[in-house]
Amino acid sequence: MENQELLQAVDIGPWKLRTRIAMAPMTRGFANDLTGTVGEEVVAYYRRRAKDGVGLLITEGITPSPRGKGTFGVPGLYTKEQADSWRKVTEAVHEEGGTIVAQLWHVGRLTHPDLLGGMAPQAPSALQAEGLVHKLRKPFAMPEAMTIDEIRELVRQYKQAAKHAMEAGFDGVEIHGAHGYIIDQFASPVTNIRTDSYGKDREGRLRLMKEVLSAVGEVVGMDRVIIRFSELKDDQPGYRWQEPEAELDAYLTVFREAGLGVIHPSTNSFLKPVAGGLTLHELVRKRWRGALIGVGGLTPSSASDAIHAGVIDLAAFGKPLLANPDLVQRLRTDQPLIPYEPSLHLKQLL
Ligand SMILES: Cc1cc2nc3c(=O)[nH]c(=O)nc-3n(C[C@H](O)[C@H](O)[C@H](O)COP(=O)(O)O)c2cc1C
């Protein structure tokens, strides 16, 4: 069968996954905007994909802090009430035999006081992003450069949210260190012009990521932590790593030192070469023996090829899993996939 590799069961660290198919993290905006809790329709949305046979579900971005929210309807994991609401999701997924990790997402400067109870966005440096806030359609506001104490508080917030995630029954946590959000803002010399130990050089810029991983690993267990990282920035379309290989070496050193087992490099074009004719995932694979999640415009056929070639261990699908809640079933029975249509899939949870 064509999709045999994708449909194989696989053990990744402590997780016994029914297939090599992962659901990519996707913000949907259906949480209660005031309380950051999720309700029955969100439970049904994740249950449906678990029932279909998705191996690993990664949730939409969930904010660990009231100041980490970048659009309306983003759920949180900073209150007990929020954690209790997620428990219904994890129970439903487990009833269907699935595995689910919570993605923790803090947007840093890519937001506005209207979404933060009147407070300014936080960032490594007081540099304003260009562009408009998602749904709010106002320009990104000027952020405040964080003090060392505020950075320590942020790390504490990640740790508390991770604790809540485990209390809510999640099987692990993914740290969103990609796409130009706060951890990535610290990692990039374009958004981080600090001269203290959280900036200055590559090691300093990656320090927040390192501290968040270690704090979250303490409460979750490092074998249940995934990091997502990328060259891609949601607010800077043309952004490129100056030295892709040196940049990747620095990231991977942090991941090895933290003791991570699973990493999730993110791109929108899985097959596009990044350096030396190699794609992002090929470059990472040359340097990384642990588990690797592929993503970015994958089709069942390109995903199967990459698994077969040993480039990736799991294939994450985003838009295809919005359009096809029964994606796994379609692959098992050789049915074609329904194309994704933003107008339909962003308005309702199917
Ligand atoms: C509606 C939507 C929401 C998304 N939200 C997130 C998010 O919260 N966190 C994240 O890391 N990536 C997010 N992404 C990116 C996806 O995880 C994925 O990397 C991207 O869609 C490429 O995969 P695909 O081509 O299979 O859709 C989002 C993508 C879409 C389409």
Image (cartoon, rainbow, N blue to C red):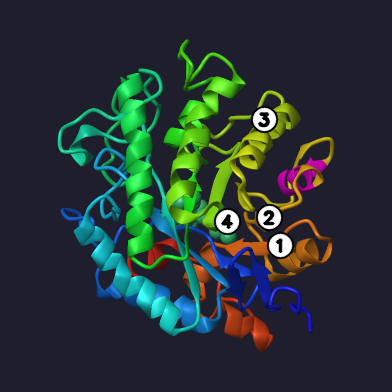
Q: Which mark is residue 250?
A: 3
Residue at mark 2: 292
Q: Nearer the viewer, residue 328 or 176?
A: 176
Residue 22 placed where, x, y %? 58, 66
Q: Main secondary structure of the magenta part?
A: helix
Residue at mark 1: 313
Q: Earlier in the sequence, mark 4 or mark 3?
A: 4
Q: CA distance from mark 3 to mark 1?
A: 22 Å
Q: Earlier in the sequence, mark 4 or mark 2?
A: 4
Q: Is residue 172 depicted above or below 326 in this figure?
A: above
Which amino acid, mark 2?
A: Leu
| Residue drawn at (55%, 47%) of the image | 227
| Residue drawn at (26%, 34%) of the image | 112
Inspect the magenta stretch and tell me whether residue 284 lies in it: yes
Q: CA distance from mark 2 to mark 1?
A: 5 Å
Residue at mark 4: 223
Q: Is residue 144 depicted above or below 293 in this figure?
A: above
Q: CA distance from mark 4 to mark 2?
A: 13 Å
